[in-house]
Image: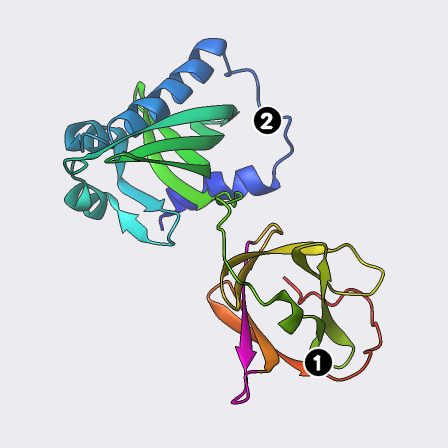
Amino acid sequence: MSMQILLPLALFAAAPRQASTSATTDRENTEIVKRAQTLFDALAPGDIAVWGEALTEDAVLIDEFGRRQTKAEVLRDMRPLPPGFSGSIEIRQPKVHFYPQTAILDCEMFEQEKVFEQELIVRYLATLVFVRQGRDWKLAAMETVTLPTAPPRLEVRDLPLADYPGTYTYGPGRNFIVEVEGRELKFRTRSDGRATSLEPLAKDVFMDAGEERNLFLFRRDESGRVTSIVERRKFNDLRMRRVEGPAPDAGDARPHQ
């Protein structure tokens, strides 16, 4: 990544929010948001010309899957949505920060996609770095992350909720306490802590209702008894074994982020 891109990103992270306002005008603010919206509008039809004109030659784009692409790679992979697919992206809550020859747009991307008769909604948080080249603003860098949102609830029949309650540990004093409250499975990381719901996806497979939306897989032994949990988080597995009897608390038992 060139210094031209790294410097604006560093300024955005470290500089006070009282960025220089002398060069900031309502017109420039509107122009930056409009340029970004034009780029997003060009995604569904796969308009390479719009993106080719808007990107700096050394632009770097990182998408929600962690893929890092250069300008050439972005243009090479861009194509219209296939038949039966349609969609749009709307910029929401835009905030533009101006620095010398640089504008940084912080916003939400609200995506609506239709796949034949199914409608999908995905929300992203995005940061776009524009640099002034001559009289134009060019996109030098962009990074997006998917905003975790509650997925549709699934009905799982004959769910054996009584099989799951217990204390599961992954280290000394580090425990997950799984309980049934009403007709819902929940877990706590300490006995007096806040309970987090576990939403069923299938028998023995749940998704937590917390911010990260991790998967919980209850594992059984040869006799069919639940003996452990695998928490699949950030493409890794945290393994917890079931312990007999009460386990002592040792503060917040969540792994360090």
Q: Is residue 7 left or right of residue 21?
A: left
Residue positioned 54% across, 81% down in the render: 220
Question: Disc 2 residue type?
Answer: Ala
Q: Give the image location of residue 104, x and y in percent.
A: 47, 31
Residue positioned 49% across, 51% down in the render: 155
Q: Helix or strand or loop: what does disc 2 sit on?
A: loop
Judged from this view, the residue extending furthest toward the front is 158
Give the answer, above or below, for where 159 lies relative to 49: below
Q: Quadrant of residue 48?
A: top left
Question: Disc 1 residue type?
Answer: Gly
Give the answer, above or below, for where 253 lies relative to 21: below
Q: Quadrant of residue 191?
A: bottom right
Give the answer, above or below, for where 228 lies relative to 31: below
The disc label shown at residue 19, or none:
2
Residue positioned 19% across, 36% down in the render: 81
Q: Is residue 55 visible?
A: yes
Q: Which residues are magenta?
A: 213-224
The disc label shown at residue 171, or none:
1
- Kindly report the distance in space between the C-alpha atoms of the residues bearing marks 1 and 2: 46 Å
Earlier sequence position, callout 1 versus callout 2: 2
Most foreground residue, 3 or 161: 161
Q: Give the image location of residue 79, x and y in percent.
A: 16, 39
Quarter holding the C terminus is bottom right
Q: Quadrant of residue 121?
A: top left
Q: Helix or strand or loop: what does disc 1 sit on?
A: strand
Most foreground residue, 65 or 206: 206
